[in-house]
Image (cartoon, grey):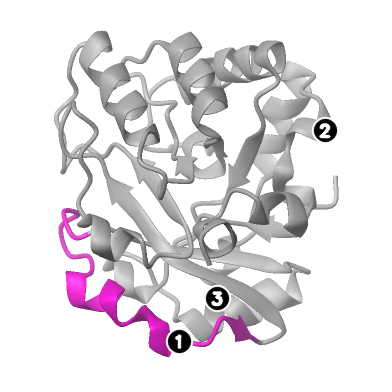
Amino acid sequence: MNYIVDTHTHSLASGHSYSTIREMAHMANQKGVRLLGITEHGPAMPGSCHDFYFSNLQVVSREMCGVELLLGVELNVIDYDGSVDLNQKLLMQMDIAIASMHLPCIRPGTRTENTRAYLSAMKNPYINVIGHPDDSRYDIDYKELVIGAKEHGVLIELNNASLMPGGPRVKAKENDLEILSLCREYQVPVILGSDAHVDEAILNFACAEQVLAEADFPQELVVNTSVERCRKYMNKYKFG
């Protein structure tokens, strides 16, 4: 497939990433990306951005090196009621918002608690993507997750970094295959995310593509091939 969108990347500002926004945009242009999401880790992640960083994003151009930018946040889900680590006023200003679970920010709960956390987060109209829900340390009812995504118009992410050898998440491939099977059954679109923490990793979907092929997942349910399709889900266009 011809991928032209990558909505999950991190710049130097996230604290454990290594490229500037301009370096990210330049590399995206070199790789043929037309729409690039730069989604810094939320404030609950150790070493990441303060609220002030997100409140000042309006000063950054949304067109750089010939690439359209979506500047936003990878939120941390911080409790089992789906609360996240940006207040609603700031969240409403983000071009894109991904909601994820990370061990420094929330301990794994029961299957019921973890699933409730994601389903509750989906109800927030300013959350666009559920990030890497493929980690067995957070047991999830994937059928409920997929049905919830369909109900609330939220994209489920297939995260390439989860699938890389030595990646941080447990049984990601097995879980992603289950998620993709359910997404195919319920006709729920997915979005690929590189989760790049350095510019060279932008648009690296090699591991995700292998899982898509193994799942025989329909191309029409992968939104990264169309800027227009992606825009329908993003705050900048839904509420801009």
Could you tell me residue 52's position as x and y percent? 20, 77
Is residue 60 within the magenta segment?
yes
Residue range (magenta)? 43-64
Residue type at mark 2 is: Gln
Q: Quarter of the image containing the N terminus? A: top right
Marks 2 and 3: which is nearer the front?
2
Q: Residue at x 34, y 28 (%)?
A: 118
Image: 219 above or below 67: above
Could you tell me residue 76's position as x and y percent? 26, 46
Could you tell me residue 147's position as x and y percent? 52, 16
Pick whichever of labels 2 and 1 is earlier in the sequence.
Answer: 1
Residue type at mark 1 is: Val
Pick whichever of labels 2 and 3 is earlier in the sequence.
Answer: 3
Marks 2 and 1: which is nearer the front?
1
Please name whichever residue, 206 or 123, is drawn nearer the observer in this view of the structure: 123
Q: Secondary structure at mark 3?
A: helix
Left or right side of 72 for 185: right
Q: Which residue is mark 2?
A: 219
Q: Residue at x 64, y 19 (%)?
A: 183
Q: CA distance from mark 2 to mark 3?
A: 27 Å
Q: Which residue is mark 3?
A: 24
Q: Secondary structure at mark 1?
A: loop
Marks 3 and 1: which is nearer the front?
1
